[in-house]
Amino acid sequence: MELDGAVALVTGGASGLGEATVRRLHAGGARVVILDKDAGRGEAVAGSLGDGARFVQTDVTSEESVRAAVDAAAGMGPLRIAVNCAGSGMAARTVNRDGTPHDLARYEWVIRLNLIGTFNVCRLAAGAMSSVEPDADGERGVLVNTASIAAFDGQIGQVAYAASKGGVVGMTLPMARDLAVLGIRVMTIAPGSFDTPIFALAPAEMREALSGIVPFPSRMGRPDEFAMLVEHIVRNRYLNGEVIRIDGAVRFPPRSV
C-alpha cells in the first residue's frame, strides 16, 4: 500500500503510539485523520502537521461517533489505512486478597474500550474501504490493530486488560479471512513496554523494573519504533492475518516489581 495520496485514520492519535503513528504516516505522504477524545491535544497535533491533517473528536465505542469520523476521513480522499491505538487498562485481581471479587463494571469497561472499540472502528473503516478503487494488485486497504504482549504474558492484576488484548489477537486471522475478498489486509502489533504518557505516570521504581527485564535493548520502546512497524506493515502487502510482537525479546514475569 502506497502512502502517498492515501488517507489514514488513527485512533488514540493525539498522544503516545497513536501520535507517533500519525506523524510518521503524514511524513510518508498520507493525509491523516486523528481520532481521539482529547480535543485540546488532538487539535494541537493536527495544527502542528498543517495541510493534510485533521482532528475529529471520537468515542471509539460509539457507532455514531466512529461513523462520523470515517465519513470525515473518506471526505479527504480514498480511505485506505486505519490504525487502532486507542485503549486503556486498569489493575485488579480476579479476587482480591480480602476476598472481594473483581468489579464487573470495570472489567466490562476495559473490554468495551479495547476490544469492542477496536472492532467497531475496523468494521466501519473496512466498510468505507470496500468502495475504494483497488490498486493494480487488487488491494483496497489495510487495518492495523494494537494488542499487547499481555495477551500472551498477562501479569497479576491484568486479567481484564489481557482478556481485551487477547480478543484483538484472536480476531486478527478471521477478520483477515473475512476481508480478503475485498482486498483489505488485517494485521496486529503486540507491543511490550513503551515510553508513552501513560507510563510517565507510573512510579520510577516500576519504570526501572519494566526497563530492566528487557533483554535488549534494555529500555522501554520508543513510540516511533512502533510507528516504523506500522509504516512497514502498510507498505508490505504480503503481511496479512498475523500478530507481530515488538518488545525487545521480553517475556513478562507474573509481576514486574
Image (spheres, rainbow, N blue to C red):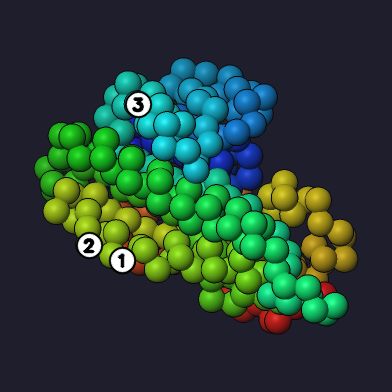
Q: Position of residue 157 (x, y in %)?
A: 71, 71
Residue 224 higher or lower than 14, as above or below? below
Which residue is rendered at x = 70% and y = 81% of the image?
A: 254
Q: Secondary structure at mark 3?
A: helix
Label 2 vs label 1: CA separation?
A: 6 Å
Count the labels in the image.
3
Residue 83 higher or lower than 157, as above or below? above
Of the numbered discs 1 and 3, the one sitting upstream in the chain is: 3
Residue annotated with mark 1: 173
Label 3 vs label 2: CA separation?
A: 25 Å
Q: Nearer the viewer, residue 8 or 227?
A: 8
User: With 132 as the anchor, is 77 left or right in this view?
Assistant: right
Q: Position of residue 244 (x, y in %)?
A: 44, 66
Please rate how many residues cluster around mark 3, counting C-alpha atoms within 10 Å: few if below 14, some from 14 to 19, many from 20. Answer: some
Which residue is rendered at x = 87% and y = 60% of the image?
A: 204
User: With 62 as the anchor, is 7 left or right in this view?
Assistant: left
Residue annotated with mark 3: 71
Circle number at residue 177: 2
Task: Identify which amino acid the numbered label 1 is placed on.
Answer: Leu
In this view of the protein, can residue 250 be seen by the observer? no
Q: Secondary structure at mark 1?
A: helix
In this view of the protein, can residue 86 be seen by the observer? yes
Task: Identify which amino acid the numbered label 3 is placed on.
Answer: Asp
Of the numbered discs 3 and 2, the one sitting upstream in the chain is: 3
Residue 6 higher or lower than 242, as above or below? above
Are the two marked residues, 2 and 1, in contact with CB atoms closer than 8 angstroms? yes
Which residue is rendered at x = 14% and y = 53% of the image?
A: 181
